[in-house]
Image (cartoon, helix red, strand yellow):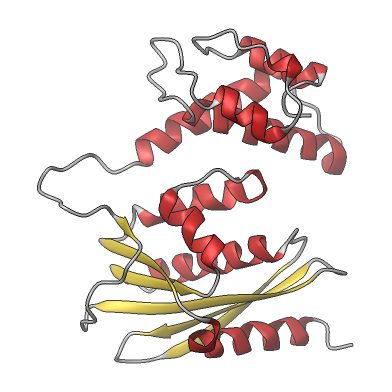
Amino acid sequence: MLFTCPYASKVWDLAPLASGENILTVLNFQEGWERVRKIPSLPPMGIEAGTLAASIIWSLWRSRNNIIFEKRKFTPEETLQKALTDAREWIRAQPLPNPKISKPLIRLEPSPRNPDLCSIFTDAAWNPSTGVAGLGWVIDDLLSPSQHSAVETSVSSPLMAEMLAVRTAMTFALSCRFESITIFSDSQILINLITRKMMNLEIFGVLKDIYLLSTAFKSITFSFIPHLQNAKADLVAKQTLWASNPV
């Protein structure tokens, strides 16, 4: 659908990519992604290889959802324009390279504990029959520990629920004016996706939000912890899910 259907094919034909890759022979998403992610954009676009392709895929997915769920149709030209706009916004949101900074903004291992560093433990509980997810996050800033929760509907999978928990916790941290945070999760897949900036179509939009939110912090770390060490956040998430539909 994202490569070989007539609508998607038209969008790819219009895309300012340097190679006329024949995507009509693509058999599955992984094969299609491997073909397009290495193709650079034509000048003067200035969009690196992979960024524009990922943005086009996401824009196609949203256009498909708009047709199915909202009965809104967009032309291939409109879908491509949205992809170009999103790709440019993504590039502008990236931190400028600084030779004085020896470590990347997003790190896998946490920094040594200090009073200025806020630790946030996140988790989610998901009901596959209703698509409802309970999100939980526990703030441990050494001064005033607290726990918080939220409910999300139309959640497609446990991984999406975990991602939403991280995004919501980051948004909350910004509202509290935290400058340096460590996000802990017991989902190894989630941590790998974020720290390695891997491609995953299902949660691409939420991943993009997380990367953009990361730029607002002075420093941010994402770290995996065993499930037993995340018991408080797990309990908050489960209680929130139960409270949203106790029957």
The answer to whether 222 is drawn above or below residue 42 in the figure is below
Q: Give coordinates of residue 234: x percent, y percent.
A: 60, 84
Identified at 24% across, 72% down, the residue is 111
Which image quarter: residue 239?
bottom right
Q: Quadrant of the C terminus?
A: bottom right
Decide which of 77, 33 is in the foreground and name it.
33
Decide which of 21, 184 is in the foreground and name it.
21
Q: Is residue 209 visible?
A: yes
Decide which of 125, 189 is in the foreground and name it.
189
Identified at 82% across, 68% down, the residue is 128
Identified at 86% across, 39% down, the residue is 68
**Left or right, 118 with reference to 28:** left
**Left or right, 20 with reference to 223:** right
Identified at 50% across, 81% down, the residue is 226
**Left or right, 94 with reference to 90:** left
Q: Is residue 75 visible?
A: no
The answer to whether 145 is drawn above or below residue 95 in the figure is below
Q: Give coordinates of residue 206: x percent, y percent.
A: 57, 53
Q: Give coordinates of residue 123: x percent, y percent.
A: 57, 76
Q: Quadrant of the N terminus?
A: top right
**Left or right, 49 with reference to 165:** left
